[in-house]
Structures are given as structure tokens and as C-alpha cells.
Amino acid sequence: MKIRNLLRVFAGLPGVLLWPQVQAQQGDWYLGAGAGMNEAGAFHQAGFNDDTLCYPAFVCDGAPAGYRWFYDLESDSGMALELAAGRAWNGWRTEISLARLDNDIDQRFTGIEFLNGDPVRLIEQNDYRISTRASAGDLLIYSLAFNVYRDFPAAGGWIPYLGAGIGAARAELTALYFEERYTCISEVCQGRPRSEFDSLQLADLSDTVYTAQIFAGADYDIGNRFKLGLKLAWRHVDEFSAVDSYLEHAPPSKTNTNSFSNTSHWSLALELKRFFE
């Protein structure tokens, strides 16, 4: 992504936030904090390398240009945390918020192909036994966003609102693990030493991307300039990718690139606001 563009956006946020103070005679600054649960939809992983090694289980027409692999990723329910600072005036609010989303990830292998797009065909019988393990840890999203809200007239003590925001997010997939081991079915494998085919990777992959969000909620005035409410949020986090090296691989010093599709997060949080004159 173009980080310079994000820096320009956030460089202008203080002026946007202070604008209501100049335009309106009355307004309140506030600090907010919220905690709740979030649900992330399924997303996908696609990776590739430029490994020219033909592995024993594969049928190769000459040295391959590399490999491409695919996984489906599913998430469990996780925590949603948010801190915010903003200003309210004439039924409107502007704020800058920091949010953190955390979801456990289940990874499911869906396919592999050569880098040129040709399907990988398997040899039915060979001298090697292959053991493969793959897993992922948590999906972590840290976001910095500028939000605008419209507060509606109170009804029964509740103040409903709608809002939207844009910003930047650091997306991280932790503990991405891949291990592939080769052993001989017979005492001596016919071909290259089995250890040359072993692979091992354990990495935390992260990237900085765009995020957008919309909100709906309601606050209740509990006195002494405090408001307590429920906030429903939907957040879109753009696709991200990262390059990492193997801990063990043949040939050595090889890297791989993994990309993750965009994610959508629903969260419901209990939020407390403290207003100041």
C-alpha cells in the first residue's frame, strides 16, 4: 500500500478534529473505551516460491519454476478492544480511535500447483514416505482510524447513533507453521538423500493496509458526564502479504511469499465515554 498517502491523511486529522471547536460555540471533548467480542469471516491464503526442486511425490516435466499453494482459513470468536478520543458538537462527533481484534485461526490445505499454473500430478509409488504438518496461530488487527458519528435525539434515555470511519491497520497472522519430512519406505531411497527434501517454516507475517468501518449503537447517560452504551461495528481490512524465509529448506536461502485475502469483522462491545467541558 502507499504509506505516504496514509501519512498525509493522518497529518490532517488534528485539524479536522479541531474544526468543530472553531465552528461551534459549544462542544464536549470525550475519551472512550470499549471491550467486547468479534467475529471474522472466512478468508484465504495463497503462497508461492521459486523452488526448482522436483520432489519425489511429484511428476515434473523438467525443473519447475516454483510452486504455488492454497489454504482456506477459518476464525473463532475473539476479543475486540477500542480506545478513542473525540469531540461532540450539535449532534455530531469526530474521533480518533485505536482498536485491537484477535481471532484464533484454523488452516485447511486446499491445493498446490506449479508456479506456471500447471496442476501437480502425484506419483502413486515411490521410495519416500512424506509427513506434512501445517497450522496457523492468531489473526491480530491493530487499527488507527478517523471516525465520524451522527447522534440522534434521545429516546427513553438512550441516544442512538450511526458512524463510519477510515484508517490504517496492521494485520498480523502469528505462528504460521509448515513442516514437511521425508523418510525412506525401504532402507535406502533410490535417488537424492531424503534430508534434501525437508522443509520447515515458523513465522509471524504482517503488513500495513487500509481499513474501513461502519458503526451503529446507543449510549445511555449515567450522570457525572459519563455515558454507557452498546456499539455494533463492521470493519473491512484490506488483503495483506509478507515475504519470509524458511528455517530449513533445500536449496538454502529460499524465501516464500504468502498473501491473505481481505477480512470482514463484526463486533459488539460495551463502551464507556467520559465527557469534558
Image (tube, rainbow, N blue to C red):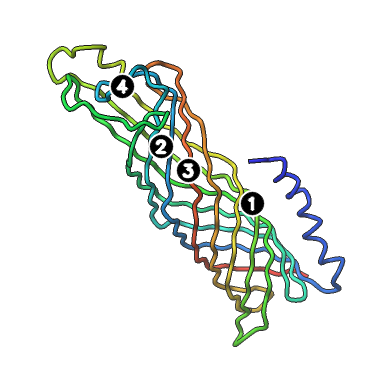
Q: Which of disc 1 and disc 4 is earlier in sequence?
A: 4
Q: Amino acid at mark 2?
A: Leu
Crowd around label 4: few <14 · some 14–19 · many ≥20 (10 Å): some
Q: Which element carries disc 2, helix, strand or loop?
A: strand
Identify the disc placed on residue 65: none
Q: Which residue is denoted by mark 1 in the rendering?
A: 144
Measured Cα–Cα span from mark 2 to mark 4:
28 Å
Amino acid carrying label 3: it is Phe
Picture disc at residue 260: 3
Of labels 1 and 3, the one closer to you: 3
Q: Which residue is mark 4?
A: 60
Q: Which residue is found at the position 40% from the left and 49% from the top?
A: 104
Residue 269 at x, y = what percent? Answer: 52, 66
Front position in the image: 213 or 137: 213
**Amino acid type of the residue tagged 1 in the rendering:** Leu
- Residue 56, percent across and down? 25, 21
Q: How far is disc 1 from disc 3 in space, using C-alphas?
A: 20 Å
Separation of marks 3 and 4 at Cα, in angstroms: 28 Å
Identify the residue at horizontal 63%, vertical 49% (top origin). 168
Rendered-image quadrant of the N terminus: top right
